Amino acid sequence: MVEVTLIEASRRAALQEMRRDERVWVLGEDVARGGLWGQYKDFLGEFGEQRVVSTPISESTIMGAGLGSALVGMRPIIEMRIFDFVMCAMDELVNQIAKIRYMFGGQAKPAVVVRMPHGMWRNSAAQHSQMLEAWFAHLPGVVVVTPSTAEDTAGLLVQAIRSDDPVLFFDPKDLFGVPGNITDPIEPIPFGVARQVVEGNDATVVSWSAAMPVATKGVAMLASDKIQVDLFDLRTIWPWDQEAVIASVKKTGRLLVVHEAVEVAGFGAEIIATVVDKLGPGAIKAAKRLAAPRIPIPFAPPLEAEVRVTPEKVVTAVKQLIAV
Amino acid sequence: MSEPGDNLRRLTGLYSTMARIRAFEETALEAHKAGEIPGPLHVSIGQEAVAAGICVNLRIDDRITSNHRGHGHAIAKGADPKRMMAELYGRANGYCRGKGGSMHIADFSVGMLGANGVVAGGIPIAVGAAQGLKMQKSDAIATCMFGDGAINRGPFLEGLNWAVLYKLPVLFVCEDNGVAAFTRSENVTAGPGVVDRARALGVKAITVDGNNVMSVDDAAQSAVAAVRRGDGPHLLHVRTYRITGHTSTDAAAWRPAEEVQEARSRDPIARLGAVLCERGVPATDLGKMLDEAKAEMTAARKDANAAAWPEARVAYEDVQDTGAVAWSK
């Protein structure tokens, strides 16, 4: 075990897989310099300029060329630098990558990993802070990975690179410096298995990505008030661990979903709807979402703070659920 | 050096390929009008010399990406018209098991990486395929077929720039039929056009008469050889004419009749037929090739119309390995 930051854990995972499989290559802006976040530091020296390709700012072609290489047997890591820039490559992602296996009748499995560092980070304003992972859970044909720890980032990235499915990997920008302990070698973590962080009978709390440490703090504050909850980090939102969440809600009867993305039509709505469908409304006493208001991410620190979920809001929300 | 006999065999082969594409398109059009083929259908009648003249220069392991008007490219690359027709009909034995249709025909076994429903959608894919082939140290190349409408989309600029930067083995083919859906391309395209745009980025580019299959073949032969030996990307601007409408339901009645008539007089199949006759090929041999092509496609139509529909569970297959939704009756 070695203690590293989340971003370093991701670097080691990609490094391990590029050493293991010469079909893996990485392309994106500045990746030969180590990437914007240092996630590919020293890759160029080891793997050379054919496998570590710094590209022009051409998101459509970064995405589409990654796909094209996959169609001849390569396994690209497509680096989007910052999530919001994927908007410039939506045809290649949504119409091409997500559809090719299906609409060609299974002739090709595009084994691509698209890395998209997302979320609020140091007041980066409306075009560098978004969390739109729910859009992609809505998109058939892709896996949506949303880790919050160094351990999970490492294991899920290994799994993503080895997967034959297109994997959309949402790196949590705001948590890049958070330390964790990773193994050597890094073992893959299967998609769709939630990690239970805390156990309790009073309520079920579900979160992922940058909202996860917030939920964890809120849950710790509740514990000092003698309120014990089941807390899950979903880690991947498609597929997501319905079994674990449903079993927990069956026990607690109360469900809170916490995410950094906008509440309206967010993935929290899907989780609550699924749980209600599967358990029946009678099994649930109360359910609630805690998420961002439907406004763009503002710049000024006090305005940005308005958008964020906080541990205090988690405490209030759980107490409201329990009061029902 | 090729012998005159080889050349005649090559030209006869091109004639046969064009005849088969024409017969496929005419048969599909009839079947669509008869209500046998659902959905939109974009045929390439009049443009056959482009597909035939380019693809005759490609090996089976060379890859192509195509566009919404891609039946001819698939046939010329070696795809099986029976399975293509079955796909147009949406049947279980079609190339895509009935899940793609006319706009998404692919046959990876002959290097046909798929037609595409989005204009310019195949450009980044072809560029990436070329990059992958280069990484694998293969001498196979990628060829990208797109129309004149595609040169006004961003991926055209991005893809050409990219291919030059990494000196990729890719041949860009702008199949210019003069019209982007229902709009004349010259009315919506600034500047002198695709060749100048390509040259500005350092892509070697020339214009070719796309209704003369021998010109297309000659130009493609040099371009493919250059791309294969590592010279970097080339572009062929191949000028042709779309005899029919944008889709099978479009009469393209906005075009003056004289214009279409003039284009018919430059029909690529008839033109090559005249050359072959001059070189001593009996007209009956040519007629036989046309008849055989028609018979092949008529049989494909008959088979497709009788073929089974895909079962409902097929709709749930090949979505993804992890996180797929299961079919239940």
Image (tube, coloured by chain):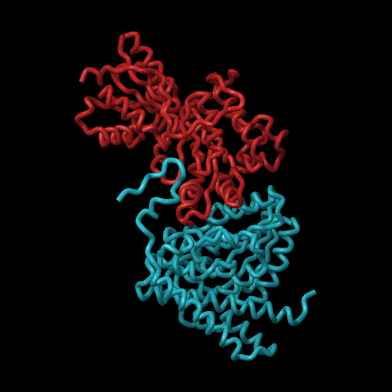
Looking at the rendering, which quadrant does residue A52 occupy?
A: top right
Residue A93 seen from this side = yes
Left or right position of B188 against B134: left
Identity of the residue drawn at 61% across and 46% down: A74
Residue B151 seen from this side = no
Please state which of residues B188 and A236 is positioned toward the viewer in this rendering.
A236
Looking at the rendering, which quadrant does residue B172 occupy?
A: bottom right
Identity of the residue drawn at 37% across and 46% down: B326
Image quarter of the C terminus of chain A: top left
Q: Can you say whether A220 is above or below B181 in the image?
A: above
- Give residue A299's position: percent from left, percent from top: 45, 27
Left or right position of A317 against B157: left
- Give residue B268's position: percent from left, percent from top: 59, 79
Please state which of residues B1 and B256 is positioned toward the viewer in this rendering.
B1
Q: Count every numbered label the image shows and give the total.
A: 0
- Give residue B251's position: percent from left, percent from top: 41, 75
Spot the residue most to the right. B1
Image quarter of the N terminus of chain A: top right
Which one of the lettered chains is coloured cyan? B
Which one of the lettered chains is coloured red? A
- Give residue A174's position: percent from left, percent from top: 50, 24
Q: Can you say whether B31 is above or below B131 in the image?
A: below
